[in-house]
Amino acid sequence: GKEGRFRENLLGKRVDYSGRSVIVVGPLLSLYQCGLPLEIAIELFQAFLIRSLIQRHIAPNLRAAKSLIRDKGPLIWNVLKEVLRGYPILLNRAPTLHRLGIQAFQPILIEGRAIRLHPLVCAGFNADFDGDQMAVHVPLSLEAQAEARL
């Protein structure tokens, strides 16, 4: 059955601060940028977004901040843009066979549900736009962020 030890624990695990979506072409992006859908960005950066809303006195507490985030208004879009500024994300396309299988990008907020990529960076990932999926990871530690910026 599907409840064996290999399938349950060893072959795959859930990872925090990560997501997955289909990739589509983003010809207007720079080579170092990727289009990150608002829905994915809110989920990945929710803790950072809540902290920012409370520190800026936009929301008085956690409950109010979560309520604002749920509404996904233009205010959240602007605060999230500020949170994302200078914060790299990692894109990974399985199978990762060499070092270009994972690359860092500067996220740009977009509408929709698909990750946008410049067509010229696809060769390193061996990706195309026929339904390929990519995983998104947020480097949390300062060391991981510094390494992603290299």
Image (cartoon, grey):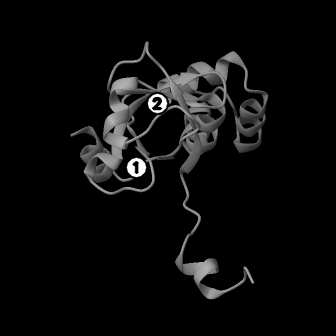
Residue shown at the point (59%, 38%) measured from the top left: 131
Amino acid type, callout 2 = Leu
* Number of residues whose C-alpha sits closer than 10 Å to that of mark 2, classed few (under 14), some (14–19) or many (20 or more): some
Q: Position of residue 78 (x, y in %)?
A: 58, 19
Q: Residue furthest top?
A: 28
Q: Position of residue 21 (x, y in %)?
A: 59, 41
Q: Is residue 115 above or below residue 20?
A: above
The quadrant of the image that shows the N terminus is: bottom right
Foreground residue, 26 or 149? 26
Q: Residue 26: horizontal and vertical position, in percent?
A: 48, 20
Question: Based on the displayed image, in which of its 4 quarters is residue 9 positioned?
Answer: bottom right
Q: Disc 2 and disc 1: Cα gap in Å?
A: 12 Å
Q: Is residue 44 left or right of residue 2?
A: left
Give above or below for 108 relative to 45. above
Q: Who is closer to the viewer here, 91 or 145?
A: 91
Residue 3, above or below 41: below
In the picture of the structure, the residue carrying the numbered disc 1 is 139
- Tell me if residue 91 comes above or below residue 58 in the rendering: below
Q: Residue furthest left?
A: 150
Classed neighbour count for the residue bearing mark 1: other residues with Cα under 10 Å, few (<14), some (14–19), many (≥20) = some
Please give the name of the residue rendered at 56% of the width and 34% of the height, measured from the top-left corner: 130
Label 2: which secondary element: helix
Which residue corresponds to the image point at 26% horizontal and 51% vertical from the top-left?
A: 99
Q: Residue furthest front?
A: 130
Dividing the image into 4 quarters, which one contains the C terminus? Answer: top left
Residue 84 got which mark? 2
Residue nearest the observer in this picture, 66 or 12: 12
Q: Are marks 2 and 1 in contact (CB under 8 Å)?
A: no
